[in-house]
Amino acid sequence: STYVFGLEYPFTTFLFRPLDRFQDFYSVMRSTVDLDPYRVREVIDVPGHAGIEVSNYFPFAHIVFYPFSRLEQDTALLLFLSISLVFCTYFFFRFMRAAGVQSLTEKWISWVVFVPMSYPILFTFDRANIELWVFGFVALSVLSYERLRFGSYSIFLALAASFKLTPFIFLFPAIKEKRWRAVFGSLLVFVVLSLLAFLCFEGSVANNLNSL
């Protein structure tokens, strides 16, 4: 479709294709609703998509978002984005306080600049990508580590890695300080969450592991 001054995408936005807006979230919903996320499925009449799709998230992510998949599509999206915005706002103010910022006015001005005007956050909201929650769990793990609450650190980091493996990079501070209980505790929670999630899926654990 035509937008401002007769121009079309990509000249009208610095974000992704408008037809593909929120499709990261909707894709997870499609993969999750039947608890068979690693089955290759056809995508028909979905703007911005063509052909087939299959989940690239770890199993626990689909268990977390299964309740969303049972809701009406727009209701699920609104709930997800609202919770994500609360996550971002909460952690932003926590880190501002840790940085020693006292003025409430300064905090809110900074929030406007660094949250709704931040390109990475805008892009992630535009895609409605569930990695917004990965950020939330990673932030909780970092806050827990700074407070020397290593049990909470291990659990939150495992929750983040149970969506995608990359958050385990935040194990390096614990490894450097030889906090082996926190390291192996986080790995153990990750394995348990993943196996429990596999048990909830259609098909055998072996088949789902092969598909993953």
Image: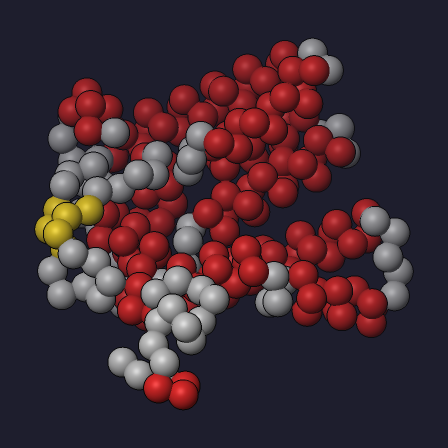
Please provide percent x and percent y for residue 3. 36, 84
Q: Residue at x 68, y 23 (%)?
A: 173
Q: Which residue is farthest bottom?
A: 5
Nearer to me, 202 or 209: 209
Nearer to me, 62 or 51: 51
- Please identify the quadrant where the N terminus is shown: bottom left
In the displayed structure, would residue 173 be above or below residue 159? Answer: above
Please provide percent x and percent y for residue 142. 67, 36
Apparent side of residue 148 relative to residue 81 in the rendered image (left or right): right
Q: Residue at x 88, y 51 (%)?
A: 100
Nearer to me, 125 or 159: 125
* Rendering quarter of residue 109: bottom right
Please provide percent x and percent y for residue 91. 67, 52
Report if residue 208 is visible in the image. Answer: no
Q: Residue at x 81, y 53 (%)?
A: 97
In the displayed structure, would residue 183 be above or below residue 137? Answer: above
- Marker count (numbered): 0
In the displayed structure, would residue 152 be above or below residue 61? Answer: above
Q: Residue at x 63, y 21 (%)?
A: 172
Apparent side of residue 7 relative to residue 51 in the rendered image (left or right): right
Apparent side of residue 207 relative to residue 184 in the rendered image (left or right): left
Report if residue 58 is visible in the image. Answer: yes
* Rendering quarter of residue 162: top left
